[in-house]
Amino acid sequence: MENVKKFKYFTVSSLAFGTWRIGGGYWYASHDRDNEWVSAIRKAIELGIRLIDTAEMYGNGHAEELVGEAIKGFNRDELFIVSKVWPSHADYDNVIKSAKNSSKRLGTYIDLYLLHSPSRVPICKTISAFEKLVDDGVIRYFGLSNFDVDQIERARECVSKYEIVAIQNHYSLLNRDDERKALAYAEKNGLMYMAYTPLENGILARNEFLASIGKKYNKTTIQVALNWYITGRNSLIPIVKASKIPHVEEDAGAMGWRLSEEDWREIDEHFREKSYFLDKFVSSLKSIRPWSS
């Protein structure tokens, strides 16, 4: 119950495990906590979080290496691995090169390959490379990250023989601007929508209203927030991240149950007004520089 979600071409866990700042940060690697991160990823998989999100930029590729180490011994067919190509690598040749390098670091094929954010490179050149990668078995599917609806539609016009199957954008109870845009588009068109920063870096974990709802289910604030995403829309997959095993266990505890329709709507209404001003703030930031996960 509420552990997996089915899409046109694949079935994935209803939570994704993210790897931003695992193994380093923005194009730099750190090996200080490698064992801790590998253990966290393995625990997530053991608890049913089989969708793992990474990128070539995370730790300058080291996050992918840690994912590759963590998945050893698991049934590969039960996992769904997402990686991303950086926009400065979005031309045809560099997309091919980046994907092959990511696959090598992971030690396996890539289930879903995303363009990390819009690029100055014409999108049709990137899509053409994605389709070649599918043909060659390096990736299975492709999609887009940090794209608005107009950009998604332009990209879809470039596709010749496959489909764009997924979008990954910033979305949370406190940042609901995309709800009327790319998330609604994903729902309408049957695309998977992966939401990064769903807990707003811990802000929602301290929310008293969610805590009061959680008492009714014997669930934590985090579990209530994540379950709200999981149960509300079939397309929506929140991305979580944790380094400590108890925190991984808490995140996984958002699966396997569901909020009542009444409680889901109460949460929806409570945060709808609160998110308005943050939406405006986030939109102003996006006008300054591209948003990145």
Image (cartoon, grey):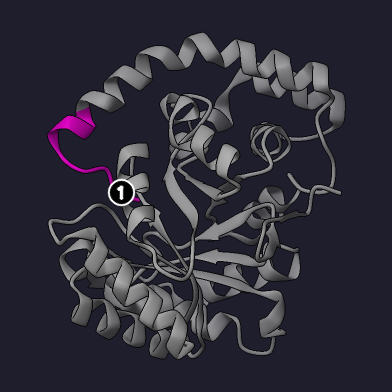
- In this view, the residue in front, 275 or 91, is 91
* Percent x, y of residue 102: 37, 81
Residue positioned 85% across, 23% down in the render: 216
Number of labels in the image equals: 1
Horizontal arrangement in the rendering, residue 139 relative to residue 268 (left or right): left
Q: Is residue 194 above or below residue 142?
A: above
Above/below status of 178 relative to 21: above
Helix, strand or loop at mark 1: helix
Viewer-proximal residue among 258 and 186: 186
Q: Residue 169: x percent and y percent? A: 41, 44
Expressed as whole percent of the image width and height from the top left, the position of residue 253 reads 76, 48
286 is within the stretch colored magenta = yes
**Residue 31 in view:** no
**Label 1 environment density (alpha carbons within 10 Å; few <14, some 14–19, many ≥20):** few
Amino acid beneath label 1 = Arg
Name the residue: 38% across, 63% down.
Answer: 159
Magenta segment? 285-293
The residue under label 1 is: 154
Q: Residue at x 24, y 59 (%)?
A: 123
Say above or below: 34 vs 107.
above
Give yes or no for residue 133 being in the magenta stretch.
no
